[in-house]
């Protein structure tokens, strides 16, 4: 399938479609739609929180580097590690339909970033599909 040039508005609409498919909290979808605000799901219960300044910078750098739009982040952490799953839509609309179908099956494209908090160093930075589960409008990574 041929890739077409898509607008920021079209990318944002696809982000909203993914968010609805994921059954994210309605307030979170509304905030993204009206104010471009991205939230994160935190911990094993997927509690919703606003991004802190460091996370906003990480999100913006990723979007600029990969010419994409992040619409949600899953954040897991331990004593020494922070793990972020950046959920995003690229400008390559040739995969959008298949990506939405994968989402319906519980798998989603993510950029995984793992940071060692003691060394203040990135340990991993890779893209791939992850398994997710919705818990009360938030998301957790299950595989």
Image (tube, rainbow, N blue to C red):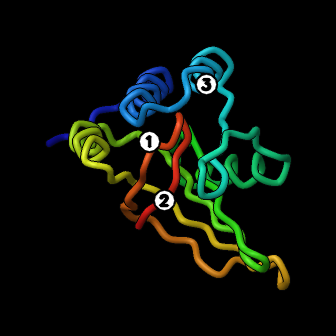
Q: Which residue is mark 3?
A: 32
Spatial distance from mark 3 to mark 2, Cα to Cα?
21 Å
Q: Which residue is mark 2?
A: 141
In the rendered structure, are the residues bearing label 3 and label 2 in contact, judged by CB atoms less than 8 Å apart? no
Measuring from the top left, give residue 16's x and y in whole percent. 46, 26
Quadrant location of the N terminus in the rendered image:
top left
From the viewer's perspective, is the residue at label 2 or at label 1 nearer?
Answer: 2
CA neighbours of label 1 inside 10 A, class few (<14), some (14 to 19), many (20+)? many
Q: Which residue is mark 1?
A: 89
88 left or right, relative to 52? left
Query: Which of pointers 1 and 3 lies earlier in the amino acid sequence?
Result: 3
Q: Secondary structure at mark 3?
A: helix
CA neighbours of label 3 inside 10 A, class few (<14), some (14 to 19), many (20+)? some
Query: Which of pointers 2 and 1 lies earlier in the amino acid sequence?
Result: 1
From the viewer's perspective, is the residue at label 1 or at label 3 nearer?
Answer: 3
**Residue under the point 59% across and 17% down:** 30
Query: Which of pointers 3 and 2 lies earlier in the amino acid sequence?
Result: 3
Say which of 121 and 21 sits in front.
Answer: 21
**Residue under the point 40% across and 61% down:** 130
Measuring from the top left, give residue 134's x and y in whole percent. 45, 43
Measuring from the top left, give residue 52's x and y in whole percent. 83, 46
Q: Secondary structure at mark 1?
A: strand
Measuring from the top left, give residue 111's x and y in whole percent. 51, 60
Q: Secondary structure at mark 2?
A: strand
From the viewer's perspective, is the residue at label 3 or at label 2 nearer?
Answer: 2
In the rendered structure, are the residues bearing label 1 and label 3 in contact, judged by CB atoms less than 8 Å apart? no
Spatial distance from mark 2 to mark 1, Cα to Cα?
18 Å
96 left or right, relative to 23? left
Quadrant location of the C terminus in the rendered image:
bottom left
């Amino acid at each position: 399938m041929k890739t077409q040039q898509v607008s920021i508005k079209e990318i944002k609409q696809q982000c909203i479609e993914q968010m609805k498919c994921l059954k994210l909290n309605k307030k979170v979808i509304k905030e993204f739609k009206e104010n471009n605000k991205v939230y994160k799901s935190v911990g094993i219960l997927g509690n919703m929180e606003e991004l802190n300044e460091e996370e906003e910078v990480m999100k913006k750098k990723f979007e600029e580097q990969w010419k994409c739009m992040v619409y949600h982040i899953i954040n897991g952490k331990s004593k020494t590690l922070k793990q972020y799953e950046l959920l995003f839509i690229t400008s390559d609309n040739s995969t959008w339909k298949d990506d939405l179908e994968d989402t319906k099956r519980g798998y989603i494209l993510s950029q995984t970033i793992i940071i060692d908090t003691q060394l203040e160093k990135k340990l991993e930075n890779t893209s791939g599909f992850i398994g997710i589960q919705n818990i009360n409008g938030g998301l957790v990574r299950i595989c």
